[in-house]
Amino acid sequence: MLAISKIGRRGAGLALMTLLVACAKENTFVPPPPPKVGVAYPLQQSVEPYLEATGNMTAINTVNLVARVQGFVQGIEYKDGATVKKGTPLFVIEPVPYKLKVDQAQAALDGAKAQLLQSSIEFDRQQALVSRQISTQANFDQARANRDVNQATVEQDQANLQQAQINSGYTQVSAPFDGTVTQRLVSVGELVGTNSPTQLATIYQLDPIWVNFTISERDVQTIRASMAKHGITTADVIGKVPVEVALQTDRDFPYKGVIDYIAPNVDPSTGTLNVRGVLENKTFRLLPGYFVRVHLPLGKIDAVLVPEEAIGADQSGRYVLVVDANNIVQQRKVTIGETFGSLRRIQSGLTTKDKVIVVGLLQAAPGEKVEPQLQTLSADDAK
């Protein structure tokens, strides 16, 4: 019985050792496979870079309509906010008193002309008599003086008539150009123009319309260097270089125009150059006072493009993750430029031979190995 007991214990020990060895083999650490990431070669494509700025819209013409003569407002000939043509009557200011002054000035002129005619006849008669030594030189001199005085009176009365006609014209305030008129600031029957010109309303010309924006001194130097390289002068820019505008709610830049003014100096207080564009605005979508986004195209170039989501940022700047020949992730510092569709221009730090991680960035870490899955960027993404 004792021998059997010893044999049983030995067998149990061997079984336990076998079980422990088996468990040890099963618990051996096996590293996980490298994460799969999508990579793509940067797209090289011809694009048109641009300067981006914030601008504001201003009317080409803005005029305060004022009463230049004194009187009661007799009529308001437009509806508040109406779009009117040049010459459209807008306000009527008590015209009768000024019409009477025109009639008075006309009557005075007619009388002066009659006096001039009579004195001219007398001058001619005296001139003929003196030549025949029938009249005296004194009579001739007096006739000439009377004629000259009457001539001066006619000229004075002509000026008075013209002034009276001008004042009479001021009794009707008309649109100086095609535009939109604001709400009236006076009422019918109100006395205006008593001590100084009274503002009646304001008219804005909305088509075409201006956009004003500024360019930094650094960008100015870059542009001027490019202009000099291509033999372009400022005269070549005005009226020819396009400018694009977008409202805050626009995704693209639907409003097109051209540069029509460039300031001759950089503002030393801001270090910027004032630039202005002019755009058609037939639908009045653009209004004075709007703040807008401005694109100034700079001409086509060949650019290196990657998806916007492939670009990261840290305290040192922007970077992308690339995969080397050993499938090891590396962080690459880059300088970025403009966006084109869903792609971003890379100005430096990347070539078209680099495999950039575009999918699975959260699974990739610099210095770690990955399993790259090659993808292809589409040129349509840059539109």
Image (cartoon, rainbow, N blue to C red):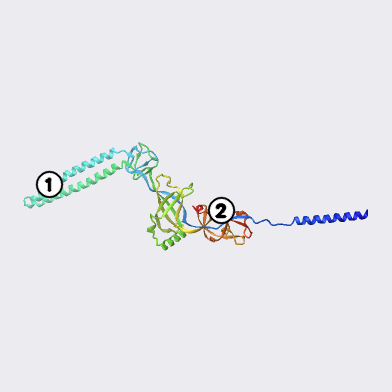
Q: Residue at x 93, y 54 (%)?
A: 2
Q: Amino acid at mark 2?
A: Glu
Answer with mark 1 or mark 2, whichever residue precedes in sequence: 1
Q: Which mark is residue 309?
A: 2
Residue 242 falls left or right of residue 14? left
Q: How many marks?
A: 2
x, y (%) of residue 293? 47, 51
| Separation (CA) of disc 1 from disc 2 | 98 Å
Q: Residue at x 18, y 42 (%)?
A: 111
x, y (%) of residue 178? 35, 44
Mark 2: secondary structure: helix
Q: Amino acid at mark 1?
A: Ile
Mark 2 neighbour density, 10 Å: few (under 14) some (14–19) many (20 or more): some
Tell which of 207 and 98 is nearer to you.
207
x, y (%) of residue 320? 57, 58
What residue sits right under mark 1 in the picture?
121
Residue farthest to the right, as pictured: 1
Q: Is residue 207 above or below residue 214?
A: above
Mark 1: secondary structure: helix
Tag in front: 1 or 2: 2
Mark 1 and mark 2 in contact? Answer it, CB < 8 Å: no
